Amino acid sequence: MEQAYIKLGNKDCRVYMAGQPEALLIQPMDEHELKSVDQEIAMIAEESGSRFAMAAFNIEDWEKELMPWPDRAVSSNAEVGHHATDTLSYIEQCLLPWSRHRWGELPCLLGGYSLSALFALWASTQVDSFVGIAASSPSVWIKDWINFARENPTKAQHIYLSLGDQEEHVKNKVFAQVGNNIRQYHDMLTTQIGDTHTTLVWNVGNHFRNSTERTANGFVWCLKRMEKEIK
């Protein structure tokens, strides 16, 4: 795939493309994830067989830029929990208009791993720009997530959830809620968008195992769901 390093607005962005894409994938990434993005792209291309473009933009402060509201279990920084709207505005007002100018209107998938997966789920309740959400090991253990999700249904059509089967077996009681919360959330999504439009995949291992592969699998599932509906 072709790739380009560009400056979009105030963020560095890596863009991957192969010919005329049929879908746009968007993923916020920190410096560590950007080191393995080439591997992730290759996995998605091989497993999906789809023509797509991906825009991976850099996140400098993970908690500050992605947390939808404050939670001291995440950070005591007073700025955390007040800037996810800025990140979503960047996607809506900068990245998507640039994409439309270049490729026209494309179905858009938003995804990520851990806190960026949580951001993607939250973003899908705020705007209807995303056809699918690829949320791999999302941090749905944050306080009030279940109540928020119950009161704010997703606007996406397809949602992929995954979790490592050891993630809920940790000593930290806050983090350990992730298993119960993701089961409850998946049940909500099944009611909201239907059981063929969402899935919950359990992976072997803890939160830190095979994150690149898990993220790629989320995007692949969403791409295949979209193609199946088109056909």
Image (cartoon, rainbow, N blue to C red):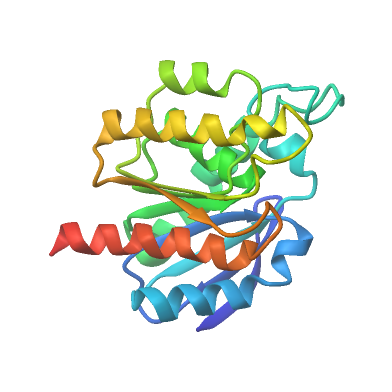
Q: Quadrant of the C terminus?
A: bottom left
The structure residue drawn at horizontal position 27% and vertical position 58%, both measured from the top left corner, is 225
Q: Nearer the viewer, residue 220 or 25?
A: 220
Residue 209 location, x and y as percent?
68, 62
The structure residue drawn at horizontal position 49% and vertical position 52%, both measured from the top left corner, is 202
Count of numbered badges drawn on the protein: 0
Give the quarter of the image for residue 227: bottom left
Q: Nearer the viewer, residue 48 or 213?
A: 213
The structure residue drawn at horizontal position 67% and vertical position 38%, both measured from the top left corner, is 66
Question: In the figure, 160 relative to 82: above or below?
Answer: below
Question: In the figure, 143 relative to 154: above or below?
Answer: above
Task: Specify whether 175 is left or right of 102.
Answer: right
Give the quarter of the image for residue 169: top right
Q: Residue furthest right?
A: 77
Residue 153 location, x and y as percent?
37, 25
Residue 90 visible from this viewpoint: yes
Task: Specify whether 203 is left or right of 229.
Answer: right
Residue 19 location, x and y as percent?
38, 81
Give the quarter of the image for residue 219: bottom left
Residue 4 visible from this viewpoint: no
Residue 91 location, x and y as percent?
54, 46
Task: Specify whether 129 is left or right of 72.
Answer: left
